[in-house]
Image (tube, rainbow, N blue to C red):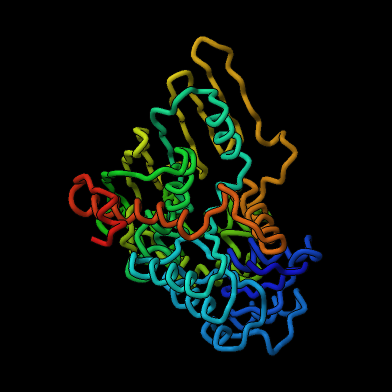
């Protein structure tokens, strides 16, 4: 496999929350390792700002990924950070041009398209890494290390909770880009292939044999609207005072997310390139993020449970729910000799050997940067840049296409189960395309 000199030349397709805010800034604090030489972004203001910020030649700034990948190859690697349903188009075109890929999750929104990308990568002999960044977060690294040390004996079962959070659900999955399955994909694949992937990893990377799943769109429906609710939060809504999903509360006055409390990054920067009270108010009044959560075109679930059985006998349960006060992930690993209980939002891991002394790990004291998925974003990119520079084989942590595909097979099987009333589905049938 070819090796590349530093700085690795990068083309970013899609300058949204992931491309612009999570990955591009790495070029600023590691300029000797990464340089952005081309971008594709349909928003003119965003594209121009990124061009100036990273010193990109004007002729290497494109409105679409299609236009960028129609051009001769401009970089060593392409970061595919567009919307879920665009991944297959952009990934295949980039591979055919000879780019190595860093591909945002999910790989694609159908099994057929996952396989199209796999075939294109094999034909082009290119390295593709999927952005399952939680494997790189110190929080999950410590849990994995405890399991490998045998701190809890043999793992019998794992219980994981994906706390989406009430306002995150409203922002991304009711009003936002991932609200509608036909326009994006189903909730489990869009949001929780992260979680399924780290569960596969914690179980030793083995295959899942069968799954069952239950879930629904329980709350964010017209019939659940409170009396006096308006179609928009700023249109004289009589339920505004008691509604936690009110857009003005989330984007203006909320202490954790509101621009009036100094929060100008996500989620506010999805509404406006430069969030201020004025630009956010305008977005709420005119744009999709000011719609009543009971009057949107959303159809993805707001709660779901997935039960998984692995070939090594381990059982896992993943619960995804919108109805939590805060985001973050909670996990319990139950083994033959002890248990692990951990809360990602608190950065705390408790390891309790049976009959022994409990040990607490405060991940925030490990001296590692925990920004961006608990420190996973930058560390994943850093490892991939090293691989491109040094060559060799990917580490067992790195989610190659084949490693990532397992989480997708499980997600597709779970959604098939959910839509058939919770009947168990053999994952082998999904892998085989049946």
Q: Is 97 situated left or right of 56 in this image? A: left
Q: Is 266 situated left or right of 364 in this image? A: left
The structure residue drawn at horizontal position 75% and vertical position 74%, both measured from the top left corner, is 54
Above-or-below relation of 334 to 260: above
The structure residue drawn at horizontal position 45% and vertical position 57%, both measured from the top left corner, is 402
- The picture places residue 287, in percent across and down from the top left corner, at 48, 72
Which of the image's four quarters has the N terminus?
bottom right
Which of the image's four quarters has the C terminus?
bottom left
The structure residue drawn at horizontal position 51% and vertical position 84%, both measured from the top left corner, is 66
Q: Is 29 situated left or right of 145 in this image? A: right
Q: Nearer the viewer, residue 333 or 122?
A: 122
Residue 220 can be seen in this image = no
- The picture places residue 169, in percent across and down from the top left corner, at 43, 54
- The picture places residue 343, in percent across and down from the top left corner, at 54, 34
Above-or-below relation of 48 to 322: below
Q: Quadrant of residue 16?
A: bottom right
Q: Quadrant of residue 280?
A: bottom right
Q: Nearer the viewer, residue 276 or 26?
A: 26
Residue 172 can be seen in this image = yes
Residue furthest out toward the top: 355
The structure residue drawn at horizontal position 59% and vertical position 59%, both measured from the top left corner, is 266
Above-or-below relation of 419 to 270: above
């Amino acid at each position: 496999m070819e090796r590349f000199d530093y700085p690795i030349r990068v083309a970013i397709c899609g300058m949204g929350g992931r491309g612009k805010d999570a990955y591009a800034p790495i070029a600023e604090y590691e300029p000797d390792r990464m340089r952005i030489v081309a971008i594709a972004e349909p928003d003119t203001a965003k594209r121009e700002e990124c061009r100036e910020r990273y010193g990109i030649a004007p002729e290497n700034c494109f409105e679409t990924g299609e236009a960028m990948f129609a051009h001769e190859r401009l970089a060593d690697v392409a970061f595919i950070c567009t919307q879920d349903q665009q991944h297959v188009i952009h990934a295949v075109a980039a591979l055919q041009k000879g780019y190595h890929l860093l591909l945002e999750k999910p790989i694609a929104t159908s099994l057929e398209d996952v396989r199209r990308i796999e075939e294109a990568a094999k034909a082009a002999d290119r390295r593709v890494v999927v952005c399952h960044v939680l494997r790189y977060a110190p929080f999950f690294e410590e849990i994995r290390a405890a399991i490998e040390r045998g701190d809890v004996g043999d793992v019998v079962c794992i219980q994981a909770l994906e706390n989406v959070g009430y306002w995150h659900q409203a922002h991304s999955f009711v009003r936002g880009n991932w609200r509608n399955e036909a326009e994006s994909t189903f909730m489990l694949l869009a949001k929780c292939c992260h979680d399924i992937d780290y569960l596969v990893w914690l179980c030793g990377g083995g295959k899942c044999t069968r799954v069952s799943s239950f879930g629904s769109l329980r709350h964010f429906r017209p019939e659940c609207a409170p009396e006096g609710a308006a179609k928009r939060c700023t249109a004289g809504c009589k339920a505004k005072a008691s509604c936690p999903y009110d857009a003005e509360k989330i984007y203006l006055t909320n202490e954790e997310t509101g621009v009036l409390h100094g929060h100008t990054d996500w989620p506010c920067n999805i509404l406006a390139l430069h969030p201020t009270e004025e630009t956010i108010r305008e977005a709420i009044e005119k744009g999709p993020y000011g719609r009543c959560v009971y009057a949107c075109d959303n159809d993805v679930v707001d709660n779901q449970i997935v039960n998984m059985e692995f070939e090594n006998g381990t059982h896992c349960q993943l619960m995804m729910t919108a109805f939590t006060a805060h985001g973050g992930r909670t996990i319990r690993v139950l083994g033959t000799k002890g248990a692990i209980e951990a809360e990602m939002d608190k950065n705390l891991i408790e390891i309790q050997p049976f009959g022994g002394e409990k040990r607490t790990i405060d991940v925030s004291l490990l001296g590692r940067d925990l920004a961006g998925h608990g420190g996973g974003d930058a560390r994943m990119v850093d490892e991939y840049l090293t691989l491109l520079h040094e060559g060799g084989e990917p580490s067992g942590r790195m989610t190659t296409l084949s490693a990532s595909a397992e989480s997708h097979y499980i997600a597709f099987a779970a959604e098939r189960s959910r839509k058939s009333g919770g009947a168990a589905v053999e994952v082998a049938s999904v892998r085989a395309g049946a």
